[in-house]
Image: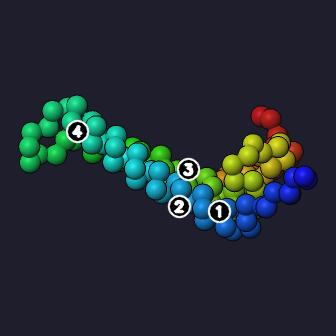
Amino acid sequence: MTAKPRKPLGTANQRYWASMIAIAVATILVAGLLGGTVTLLTDARAGRSSLWGGVVMALVMLAGWTLAARVRDRKKLDLPLWRRLDEKQAATLKQYRQWSRTGSIEDPENRSSH
């Protein structure tokens, strides 16, 4: 009896969309659960929403948005979505993020130390 080779998890595009859907679903679930828990723990009155529960939900949604943006950046550069990057890949990602923020790329090799 020989072991069958494993079937690949799909194309890079399929893995990307599966990751984005998982991030969205997990973010919504965690935001709802944590926000509801904080609302219950802060003893919000019936009919009145808890400010702290809303703050927690907003923070969790922001964290999910940030994670999705990072995955999107890696997809744009054809980098591994979830594995650790090597030095060259990390440098490429750093340059891309700098370019997206400032509109210019500073070459680390030509940087003069003043």
Q: Tell me the distance, in whole angstroms, between the alpha carbons under discs 2 and 3.
A: 12 Å
Picture layout, residue 24 above or below residue 47: below
Q: Earlier in the sequence, mark 2 or mark 4?
A: 2
Quadrant in the picture for the C terminus: top right
For the residues labelled 3 and 1, the Cα–Cα distance comes to: 13 Å
Which comes sooner in the sequence, label 3 or label 4? 4
The kind of residue tagged 2 is Ile
Q: Which residue is mark 2?
A: 21
Report the residue marked by disc 3: 67
Dot label at residue 16: 1
Of circles 2 and 3, the one toward us is 2
Counting from the top left corner in percent of width and height, residue 15 is at 67, 62
For the point 80% across and 50% down, the residue is 89
Residue 78, position in %: x, y? 76, 61
Q: CA distance from mark 2 to mark 4?
A: 27 Å
Task: Name the residue tied to disc 4.
Answer: 39
